[in-house]
Image: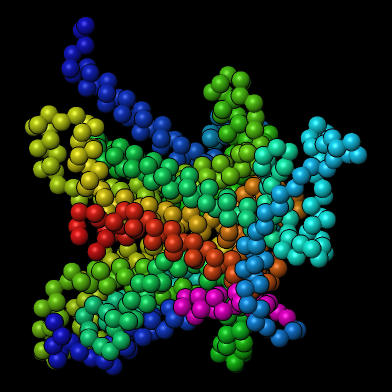
Amino acid sequence: MAITSADNRGLRLTVRYIVLVLIALIFCFPLVFMIVSSFKPDLQLLQDSGNLRAFLPVGDLSFDNYFAAFERAPVGLFIFNSVMVTGVTVLLSLFLCSTAGFAFTFMEWRGRKLAFTIILATLIVPFETIAIPLLLLASKLPWIGLDGLTYGWLNSYQVQIVPFIADGLTIYLFAQYFKDLPHELIEAARVEGATWWQIYVKIVMPLSGPVLATAAILKFLAMYNQYLWPLMVVQEEGYRPVMVGLQYFFQLNIAWGEVMAYLSLITIPVLAFYLYLQKAFIASIASTGVKG
Amino acid sequence: MASKFTVSHRSGWLMAGPAFGLMVAFVLLPFVFAVAFSFTNQRLISPNPTEFVGLTNYEQLLGLGLLTLDPLKDASGAVQMKDGEPEYPSLRSYTRNNPDYPQYDGKREWFSFSSGGDARTFVLASDVVFMKAVVNTFLFVIIVAPLQGGLALGLALLINQKLRGINVFRTIYFMPVVVSIVVVSILWKIIYDGNSGLLNNILSGLTFGAFQPVDWLGNTNTALGAIIGMSIWQAVGFHMVIWLSGLQTISPTLYEAAAIEGASKWQVFRYITWPGLRNTAVLVLIVITMQAFGLFAQINVMTKGGPIDSTQTIVFQAIQRGYGKQDISGGSAISVILFLIVLSVSLVQRYLTRDKEAK
């Protein structure tokens, strides 16, 4: 046989790449199908879904589906609502969960151990098991807003934000990260007379870039993709986020081109954000897996 | 390391208090409510006052009964047949207002099996749909946990090679994770379509037309499987990344030593990689299991529990009752049952995967 070891290595390398590419196709094809279809008229979309043209930007391409989607539903409003709810929740969560993680890691106070145990215990409570009683609670809670004192949080922004600001995983991530910071630095600052707030702002936060990115990305994904909760608590159009807004496209006659356009509209920004920051995204998932 | 400089009761509560308070209000309190409501007849909106009803909600969900019946016989003593099968007395005569059999009242047939001779044992359940939901959820978890964990490990090993451009593949494999499960469910609903669906067309193309189209989501035999396949497609990248971070904690010197000793690929995996991934394996298993028990969005978008309840799940039932029918107490009881299941499964997993050497 005249196969040299160099040929052999080249062949094996080719096989490896073929395997990698085939698997990549499996993970790509529904998303490619979605984006390509969003530019096709309904009839052509259905015809193409029977062959490989489903994945190719061929035929009568236009932005018509996108214009039609905006006409069918207040898409801009839904996107605004989602961005607003997600943004506010991420910011408040970063602030309150990092201060909590800070207090749990660096400070000694009465009830600290018990409070931390309770927070860790909530990690095994799936959200689905508290959704129903939380719904009842949310329907009765008081709120002071522009209309004065009102009861019931259904159909509002706060019902989508407040329950999700603090969560066990985020607090735990901060506490884990802070544990590895040099404690001598903090004690020294205390001895020098620095207040806890000064230590938090001037020493700890500037060192916390990675954990802030991790917590922000995880919260962003969870909030933007939320479905079950807004489905239950938001009936009014004015407060609907993008995932619930989908319902508008499944009423009466379904126009698949419009559905694809809407799905692309709400998905492509997240994909772009991910591709831009993919190292940080993957690092943030990986860091939830490092057990402390 | 408590020193007088780190003790600050007031500042401690001031900084941890807001987050802790929110968690008490929106996680702990609803959880306590769920337990409390499950013993009442609480509804979302009701003119009647809430009453304590004891275990009624649980009995209505979990009540089971066994009923063994002999087939009907005609005057000559021969077994009566109907459509080639022995005919049995009507179950309704036992389950509808029969004062002799109060334990069967209101129950319906779940399934039955032959119990020797012509006799047949009928398993009656107070809530057949819920029972199916429990079975489906367990099926989902039992299939998804090892399959998704295993595939994720395979991908992680594949991605952990030193090849040019490998990060591009890692980025692509992880991509579905950032896409909403609702979006993914709609896309796959179209792919699974029985007539012009992509999957049928691809399979038919690969087999040169020999493959007969299947209505993947409309068939009781394939619906749950189709949802399992799609769920794994969406989430496997997440666990691939967790495995990868585990792989990277294994010291390269171990692999160098193995290469010098001339170990085979399988030996390297068996004696170096796998033992090094122990903690990761436990974590991946527990995380997948917990996520799998929460199965809801896929069902709500793709099948609504159908066809013929073949994709009912525990959470879907909890939401249908608690929200759809505004039956807070019934939904809460299901939530409590789900919590107890998740808790016991994760305790069992922890026990089975405990570190036997480190005592």
Q: Quadrant of residue A237?
A: bottom right
Q: Residue at point 53% right, 34% down?
A: A56
Q: Which of the colour schemes (rainbow, by chain, secondary structure, one colour) is used?
A: rainbow
Q: Give whichever of B346, B71 is nearer the camera.
A: B71
| In the image, farthest residue toward the front | B76
User: Which quadrant does the C terminus of chain B fall into?
Assistant: bottom left
Q: Is residue A136 above or below residue B295?
A: below
Q: Give whichever of B213, B291 is nearer the camera.
A: B291
Q: Measured from the top left, where is residue A218 in percent x and y?
A: 39, 62
Task: Tally the marks.
Answer: 0
Q: Measured from the top left, where is residue B99 in percent x and y?
A: 81, 65
Q: Residue at point 31% right, 70% down?
A: A172
User: Which quadrant does the N terminus of chain B fall into?
Assistant: bottom left
Q: Quadrant of residue B217?
A: top right
Q: Give whichever of B128, A275 is nearer the camera.
A: B128
Q: Is residue A244 above or below residue A252?
A: below
The answer to if B45 sits in the magenta stretch is yes
Viewed as shown, does residue A105 lie left or right of B3? right
Q: Residue at point 66% right, 42% down?
A: B115
Q: Residue at point 72% right, 42% down?
A: B119
Report whether residue B352 is seen: yes
The answer to if B16 sits in the magenta stretch is no
Q: Is residue A17 above or below residue B49?
A: above
Viewed as shown, does residue A173 lie left or right of B68? left
Q: Give whichever of A53, B275 is nearer the camera.
A: B275
Q: Measured from the top left, where is residue B84 in percent x and y?
A: 80, 31
Q: Measured from the top left, where is residue B26 in percent x and y?
A: 48, 78
Report whether residue B173 is seen: no
- Span highlighted in magenta in the image: B26-46
Q: Is residue B112 above or below residue B94?
A: above
